[in-house]
Image (cartoon, grey):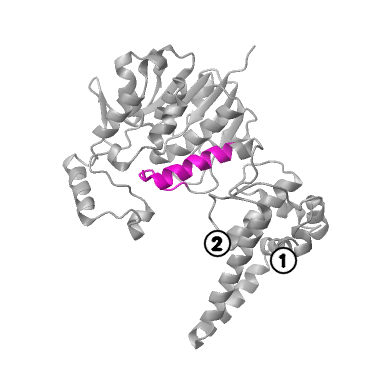
Amino acid sequence: MKRKIALVLSGGGALGAYEIGAIKALEEIGYRFDIVTGTSIGAINGAFVCSGMINEATKLWLDITANKVMKNGISISKKVVFNNRYGYSVKDFTTWAGLYFKNGLAVDISPFKNLVKEAVDIEKIKSSAIKFGIVTTKLPTFNRVNILVNDLSKDKIIPFLHASSACTPVFPIEVIDGVKYVDGFYNDNMPIDLAFEYGADEVIAIDVHFFSLNHQHKAFLHYQNVTYISPLVSLGSMLDFEQESIRQNLKRGYRDVMKHYHKMKGFLFTFRGEFPCYGFFRRIIGEFPADADKIMEIIFKDTYYHRMSDEELFIRTLELVALQNNIDDDMPIYTYDEFVKLINKQRQSINLKINKNNKTLVSKAFTKIKQKTMTAVESTLKDKYLKFFIENYINSPLLINQK
């Protein structure tokens, strides 16, 4: 009997671009789905999966803008709040705010509704063999409502997609047959349970971490029939519809799936080529015989892995060194030598800043305090381990070229 495979897509507004990248990778690997469940943007992305239109969905995401989501649209993110990265004027903000309050604490999403109406193929969804379920929330009780889209009449499919994604108090409440609905995330932002309810034997869940970097449905992470795909980095704001962010998150979703299935290398960063990692696990055991278990906990933290090869242990440690040195550019695909050069360049830059600060008495006093603090920090096991790695695999030219 054929095993039924389900795809579960979480909510998260503009972060949904990550899901499309992930789905494209899954399809390239060869996955086809019998069941799809989703909440909010996961419901809308799920409609494209069920209708076999992922290429069309990709084109839509690569063309999306804030103005195509809401009237007088602006993207809202840290980039805008702290440095106005996208060059909005005061008038842009006041116009947006005026419409928001005029509409009763909701933006006007008529552009988005028109976009969805034109892009989603109702006929293909109705004729699809994929069982398609979405989650919304009913007002005023805030009760969860599960909708089997296949059973809806054609004229109700798009309204219920909007009901699942009515992210109040940003997007407006959706009213269907006199009943008010808001976003399904109020109840379940990633409906894994619904996929199993529909008969799934295996689930691939894509979580964009809309709320935080914490998991929903933690219990399912321990179930062998659930594959959990999620980013190791924050994807940004659910209201950042600028193409710079959209395209980055499409790449992250694609790469994270490819990494999970060992088609690419890396965890937070992406790598190609070879690494001087032969016997790396045994070397850790040799250098830290009494603390090897704790070293493994340090390496495995936040990776969702249960086992690693020598190469995976090495690469994750390399990433921890980069993070320690404030390197966060996860867009390039690095070789080992390129990444080592980047780390050393950053370390030199940090040392130059420290030396520059030492020129004043105040800075010297501050540096002494900092050095005492760093001495205490370096005594921790993580810093001892990373120091060992830097000395042997970052500073040593012999080991850099070792196969």
Q: Residues within 10 Å of mark 1 (few under 14, many from 20)?
A: few
Query: What's under tag 1, amino acid-wise?
Result: Asn
Q: Please name the residue shown 23% across and 43% down the image.
A: 72
Q: Position of residue 351 (x, y in %)?
A: 59, 74
Residue wearing tag 1: 395
Query: What's under tag 2, amino acid-wise?
Result: Asn
**Of 220 and 171, the residue lying toward us:** 171
Badge 1 marks a residue whose secondary structure is loop
Badge 2 marks a residue whose secondary structure is loop
Residue 14 vs 46, above or below: the answer is below
Q: Please name the residue shown 24% across and 32% down the image.
A: 110
Residue 151 vs 26, above or below: the answer is above
- Magenta span covers which residues? 235-257
Real-space Cα distance between discs 1 and 2? Answer: 18 Å
Q: Residues within 10 Å of mark 2 (few under 14, many from 20)?
A: few
Residue wearing tag 2: 326
Q: Please name the residue shown 79% across and 62% down the image.
A: 398
